[in-house]
Image: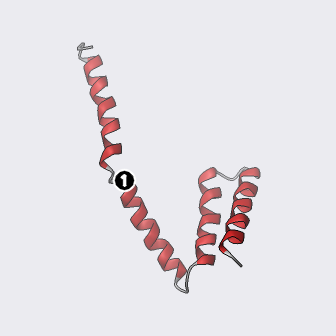
Amino acid sequence: MSGGAIGALMFGAMLLLMGVRVPIAAAMFVPGALGYWAMSSDPAWLNLLNLLKGSAVARLTVYDLSVIPLFLLMGQFATQGGLS
């Protein structure tokens, strides 16, 4: 099965899961994990777990996105302190 066919099948599975009111996170994760497993080599589950571990750390350590909540917190401190 080609990559495009697997992608189309998993996209349909995602839409089907969303249609039966499965939470969106699970409806996106399950077909994504199954598609990754179908398209990768033999130790696919180990590769999937390593990918998830690395991507979680990469998402949480982005400096540009960590500044936004701190900027909002600074605005709240300024408002509560009567500076604005």
x%, y% of residue 39? 61, 77
The total number of labels drawn is 1
> Looking at the image, which residue is at 65% across and 57% down?
27
Nearer to the camera, 53 or 12 = 12
The location of residue 78, given as percent across then percent down, is 25, 20
Instruction: From the viewer's perspective, tell me whether residue 15 is left or right of residue 70.
Output: right
The part of the image, by quadrant, that contains residue 81 is top left
Q: Which of the 4 image quadrants contains residue 58?
A: bottom left
For residue 67, what is the image quadrant? top left
Q: Is residue 79 above or below residue 50?
A: above
Quarter of the image where the C terminus is located: top left
Q: Which residue bears the numbered disc 1?
A: 60
From the viewer's perspective, tell me whether residue 59 is left or right of residue 47: left
Residue farthest along the bottom direction in this orientation? 42
**Quick one: label 1, few (<14), some, or many (20+) residues within 10 Å?**
few
Instruction: Check the image and report above or below for 59 versus 2.
Output: above
Assign a secondary structure to mark 1.
Answer: helix
Amino acid residing under circle 1:
Leu
Instruction: Tell me which residue sits at (41%, 67%) in the image.
Output: 53
Relative image position of residue 54 (x, y in whole percent): 39, 66
The residue lying at 31 percent from left, 24 percent from top is: 76
Residue plotted at (56% across, 79% down):
40
Where is residue 46 drawn, in percent x and y? Answer: 48, 79
State the quadrant of the N terminus.
bottom right
Residue 5, above or below 29: below
